[in-house]
Image (tube, rainbow, N blue to C red):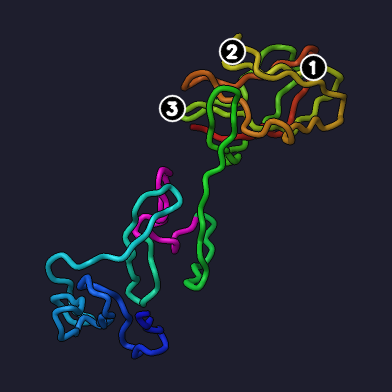
Amino acid sequence: MASATRFSDIPDASITHNVDGTNSPNVVSTSGTGALATQVQGPAADGATAVGNPVQIGGKDGFGNIQALSIETDGRLFGTNRITNFAFTAFANVNTQADGQVNNSSVLFVASQNSMYNGATWDRSRTPNTGKYIQLASSAAEQNIWTPAAGKKFRLMGFILTTDVDCNLTFRDNPTGALIFLASAKALVPTITPPNLVNGFLSGNINRILTIQASAAATIFGTVFGCEE
């Protein structure tokens, strides 16, 4: 019976692999400096720039695709295609964060994009960055409260309003336009509606104005908020 070569019998700088089709084990250099014809070696020495078409090391990812194995400049493993079938945007410079936080190079910054289902498609989640402060004299007429910048649409995401009488408040997408929200207000009791609007109500077209109308003559003051896009 042929004897088997144990890994413990092989020097640390090499491994055993049969490359010549015989039953004899052959020493394969791990440093690219093998001197025998049966040793696998490359045309470039350790640490030198690859020459020709070197044998690459890799494996299959979670999708069954073959990926090459790469090394970072500091020696860490780096997958050249770690994420496939997903679109993403990388931060070019985390020193310019929107909230002005000082960059800490020892922290791994991770970005994700939240999406919300609207019943048909997926929308990016929004955060309010615009507030419109209103103080309307007593009236039962429809009144303009949010005129977006030219070429923009308003997105109503919430409001905190107080009236001096009991009434209903109607919000419309442009004067005499489509009704987008209806709220009931009690005299001198703030009507607060931010919790369940989530992504809010987006105007149906650019340059439309958000209006409000009380069901009875009422003074209205407070804030509506959202964003423009």
* Residue 175's disc number: 2
| 99 in relation to 88, above or below | below
**Disc sitting over residue 6 in the figure:** none
Q: CA distance from mark 3 to mark 2?
A: 17 Å
Inspect this view and state whether residue 132 appears.
Answer: no
Residue 75, placed above or below residue 147:
below
- Image quadrant where one finds the N terminus: bottom left
Among numbered discs 3 and 2, the one appearing first in the sequence? 3
In the image as oriented, which residue stretches furthest toward the top? 176
Give yes or no for residue 93 being in the magenta stretch.
yes
Residue assigned mark 1 = 168
- Whether residue 26 is in magenta: the answer is no
Q: Is residue 195 left or right of residue 41?
A: right
The one nearer the camera, 135 or 10, is 10
- Residue span colored magenta: 80-97
If you read the primary sequence from the N terminus, does the residue marked by circle 1 or circle 2 appear first? Answer: 1
Residue type pointed to by label 2? Pro
Which amino acid is tagged 3? Ala
Q: Which residue is mark 3?
A: 150
The kind of residue on which mark 1 rests is Asn
Q: Residues within 10 Å of mark 2 (few under 14, many from 20)?
A: some
